[in-house]
Image (cartoon, rainbow, N blue to C red):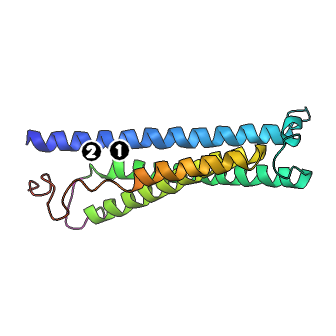
Amino acid sequence: MQDIDNKNLVAVQSLRNLIMGTTLMSTTSILLCAGLGAIISSTYSVKKPIKESVFGAHGEFVVVLKFAIVLTMLSFSFICHTLSAAFINQVNMLISTPQSVKSMVTPEYLTQHLGKAMILNVVGIRLFYTAITLQLWIFGPLLPFLSSMLMVCILYNLDFVGGDRPRNVEMEFIGNDP
């Protein structure tokens, strides 16, 4: 019985940590949106050094287009992270409901909601990373190119885990569930 309580505690703490990370990313996205909005609407000469850059097209339309694309991507990142936090909160609340035969809350239902939360979280993070790379586009084409190459290397290592473990071996905690 003690082992089951420990597993439940770890599950709830993992969900809490995921909510905290999602909240941090959504807050960062909306703060960057506010900062870009302040730069776009400023009447000061904040945009002057950007227009005097050596590389890239810096006409008035192109600068507005660059800001609008980055602002849109950050806004969608914020929406994805907010929805992800909502789904995780729902799973966190429903995970401790008592199970009955007529209950609508089934393990499949919780798994479905947790899967939606994870997909939204991944999409939000990818949008955020892409928006950060595109923010460098404001200063010219060289920085986003270098940032994109670095991002491809980092995301490749995050997405594809090394093959140290043989494929046909089951993980030890799968067989121990009652």
**Residue at 77%, 43% in the rendered image:** 139
Q: Image height check: is 28 above or below 128? A: above
Q: Which residue is mark 1?
A: 15
In the shown orientation, is residue 4 left or right of residue 132? Answer: left
Q: Which mark is residue 32?
A: none
Q: Check the picture and name the quadrant holding the C terminus.
A: bottom left
- Identify the magenta region: 98-104
Residue 78 at x, y = what percent? 59, 48
**Residue at 29%, 65% in the rendered image:** 108
Residue 170 at x, y = what percent? 14, 60
In the shown orientation, is residue 46 left or right of residue 149? Answer: right
Amino acid type for the residue under numbered disc 1? Leu
Element carrying mark 2: helix
- Whether the residues at callouts 2 and 1 have beta carbons within 8 Å, the answer is yes
Q: Which residue is mark 2?
A: 11
Residue 151 at x, y = what percent? 54, 49
Element carrying mark 1: helix
Q: Residues within 10 Å of mark 2 (few under 14, many from 20)?
A: some
Q: In front here: 83 or 154? A: 154
